[in-house]
Amino acid sequence: MHDEVISFLNPKKGQRFLDMTFGAGGHTKQLLNSTEDVVVYTLDRDPVAYKLAVQTASEVAEGRLVPLLGRFSDLPELLLNMGVGENFFDGILIDCGCSSMQFDTAERGFSLSKDGPLDMRMDSTRLTRQPSAAEILANVDEDSLSRILKVYGEERQAKKIARAVIEARYLFKSLKTTRELAQLVESVFGFQSKVDKLQRPSHVATKTFQALRIFVNDEMNELDFAMKFAHRSLKVGGRIVTLSFHSLEDTIIKNELHSVPLLTDDNNQKYKIYGLELSADDMDSLMERKWHNINKHVLTPTLEEMSANPRSRSAKLRAAIKL
């Protein structure tokens, strides 16, 4: 949904944007090409993506792309060191989840289709004390693992999978590679097959891998921080666009953006503020409102886009203006 992202951010000459998840740089490059003199600050916790951002910065006019390395929760310190304070950005993009680069590299341990070490850390070379997925499976208790799989993966067989992991530990069976974990989950399901929304084959361990990745990288807490930080960092009238790929991600985003009831249409006198029409009754409570949601309903990819890019099938786009 590249076109929708740029449309909602609505970049204008000389504006400043923050791309909180640079990844392969697709959205950042579109912003830079959208209009003259746009400046984009890019963040990524993955050192590989950061190096790519530095390379991209060398290919554009000096100062138009500012690469940053860190988690969402590192942003206050990173920006403060650059003299950037509150109410600074005209637009912020948050693209949740993993990038294709991470899934496509077997050594990172994210992918079911590529055998590699069971790692799943987005910034393993930078935060060496952060436990890998293999270390968590070797030490977590059954109850906790079951909750992780149920909450973060919405896995119906969470208890059975957790029990199988503990039993494997007692039998001294290692779970150090993605293939070993996938095969263990397959045994729990009796080697059944699944299909996704497009009726394509889907591995039964997909939700287990998702849950472990979210837990290993503390993604939900980081996202919650990002949403609150975005409100502080945007100018009044600035825009936020989010892309989520998991119901928990979307819930965190929705709760932040809908924290105050949306404006309602009526026949009373209207006042225009930051391009929004407010009635006289709305004026008293204006300062209590944090966001105005641009799109009334969450946007999802078209069937054509999902066919071209199956990884986009669960994407949800939300956009809002800071009040």
Image: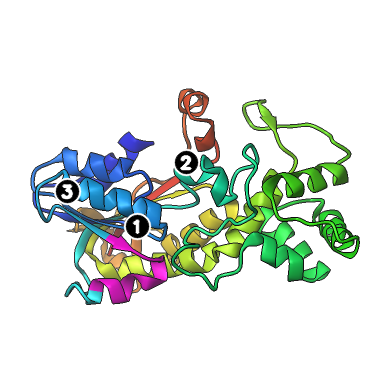
Q: CA distance from mark 2 to mark 1?
A: 16 Å
Q: Which mark is residue 20?
A: 1
Magenta span contains residue 74:
yes
Q: Is residue 289 visible?
A: no
Quarter of the image for the N terminus: give it.
Answer: top left
Neighbourhood count class around disc 2 (C-alpha, 10 Å): few under 14, some 14–19, many 20 upward:
few
296 is higher (above) or lower (below) than 199: below
**Residue at disc 1, secondary structure:** loop
In percent of the image, x 47 and y 41: which residue is there? 100
Tell me the distance, in whole angstroms, between the alpha carbons under discs 2 and 3: 23 Å
Graded by Cα atoms within 10 Å as few (under 14), some (14 to 19) or many (20 or more), the crowding at tag 3 reads few
Q: Amino acid at mark 1?
A: Met
Numbered marks: total = 3
Q: Which residues are magenta?
A: 68-79
Q: What residue is pinned by disc 2?
A: 100
Residue nearest the observer in this picture, 320 or 85 = 85
- Mark with earlier residue (2, 1): 1
Query: Mark 3 or mark 2, which is nearer the start of the sequence?
Result: 3
Numbered tag placed on residue 58 in the rendering: 3
Position of residue 295 relative to residue 323, above or below, is above
The kind of residue tagged 3 is Ser
Residue at the image position 48 percent from the left and 29 percent from the top: 309
Main secondary-structure element of the magenta-colored stretch: helix
Place of residue 8 in the rendered image (x, y in percent of width and height, measured from the top left): 29, 44
